[in-house]
Amino acid sequence: MELLRKLSEAHGVPGYEEEVRALLSEELERVCDSVEVDALGNLIARKGSGERRVMLAAHMDEIGLMVKHVDTKGYLRFMPLGGVVEQCLLNQRVLVHTSRGAVRGVIGSKPPHLLKEEERKKPVKLEDMFIDVGAGSAEEAEKLGIRVGDFVTFERSFAELGGELVTGKAFDDRVGCWALVEVLKRIEIDAQVYAVATVQEEVGLKGARTAAYRVEPDIAIVLETTSAGDFPGVKEEECRVKLGSGVVVTVADAGGRGLITHPRVRELLVGTAEEEGIEYQLEVVERGTTDATSIHLTKTGVPAGVLSVPARYLHSPVEVASRKDMRLAVELCCAALKRWSEG
């Protein structure tokens, strides 16, 4: 899990994925025939030869924040990058990434002691939060190197919990990035396998669109995370996915407006899992989508599917996932590609 730890603790919001890309490039250069970076910043690695092409994708970016204003007292106002849950921001330690390096700060708001009775009953809104970096003025903040447009990430370390569970930030989708590397280490098939670490997924599936246009795959599999619902407050009919119960195969997401998995890809993934005795779960999602949505609409169309590792508390600094599910995701991806290449 050392690679996953490094990936989780790396920092890279949409458009600023350099640190993550460097880690993945180092790993993929050891096992791939070529590794390059396209104009948008996607990392595209190729392994193998043959007429057919398969694209495996995982996104490098994580949700985060961006500085939009520094007030006269040195406090930073910010906007979200990606699907940030506002209440997850309160009282978090963060890093403001400047041209001179990272500056530590905390996200603050008015404490309950100073709130009026009616204010205490309402959740704190993002516009009422700010980042305190210890500056006493806008000039002091500037001396620290802070400027409008600097990106902000959570300061959170990777850790092990009980059983096979681990926790950290940015599991969405550094777990997928980890799986991408593990698959490329193992896979040996008669086809060109393209491992693509994409940029700017959290703000519109942007990198996947340009990368798929370049690769022109015959089939695509996205390696992702998905929300588990095995904790208090979630009904089984709302989310039936559980940690430790296997890799998740997406049937449809975003209420059908995103991806409806191609029947051949669905059969490939489910059929392989059943043939090989690999524990899996099926998922139909009403909200949220993945890079597969952009990939499957590229040029004349690409049959695509998604293999996900379930995780609790997605889009928070304390996401939780199971190492068992991660291993099964890699196992199923490798087995499915082998079956596809021989079919």
Image (cartoon, rainbow, N blue to C red):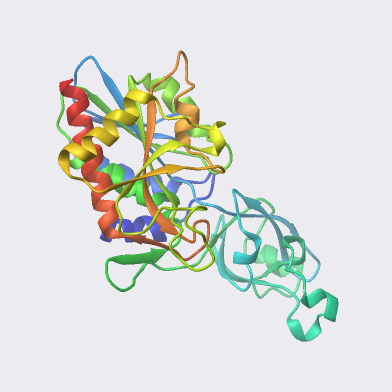
Query: Is 304 positioned to the left or the right of 273 in the image?
Result: right
Query: Is 151 positioned to the left or the right of 156 in the image?
Result: right
Specify whether residue 116 is in view. Answer: no
Q: Quadrant of the C terminus?
A: top left
The residue at the point 77 percent across, 86 percent down is: 113
Specify whether residue 97 is in view. Answer: yes
Query: 208 or 321, which lies in front?
Result: 321
Q: Is 305 above or below relative to 153?
A: above
Q: Is 139 above or below relative to 302?
A: below
Q: Quadrant of the N terminus?
A: bottom left
Expressed as whole percent of the image width and height from the top left, the position of residue 272 reads 22, 35
Please identify the residue farthest to the bottom as the structure is shown.
113
The residue at the point 41 percent across, 68 percent down is: 157
Expressed as whole percent of the image width and height from the top left, the position of residue 310 reads 39, 53
Query: Is 141 positioned to the left or the right of 305 in the image?
Result: right
Give residue 44's quadrant in the image: top left
Numbered disc total: 0
Query: 51 or 145, which lies in front?
Result: 51
Query: Is 119 positioned to the left or the right of 269 in the image?
Result: right
Expressed as whole percent of the image width and height from the top left, the position of residue 291 reads 47, 35
Q: Is 93 above or below relative to 227?
A: below
The residue at the point 58 percent across, 41 percent down is: 203
The residue at the point 28 percent across, 21 percent down is: 53
Expressed as whole percent of the image width and height from the top left, the position of residue 195 reads 31, 34
Query: 244 or 128, which lies in front?
Result: 244
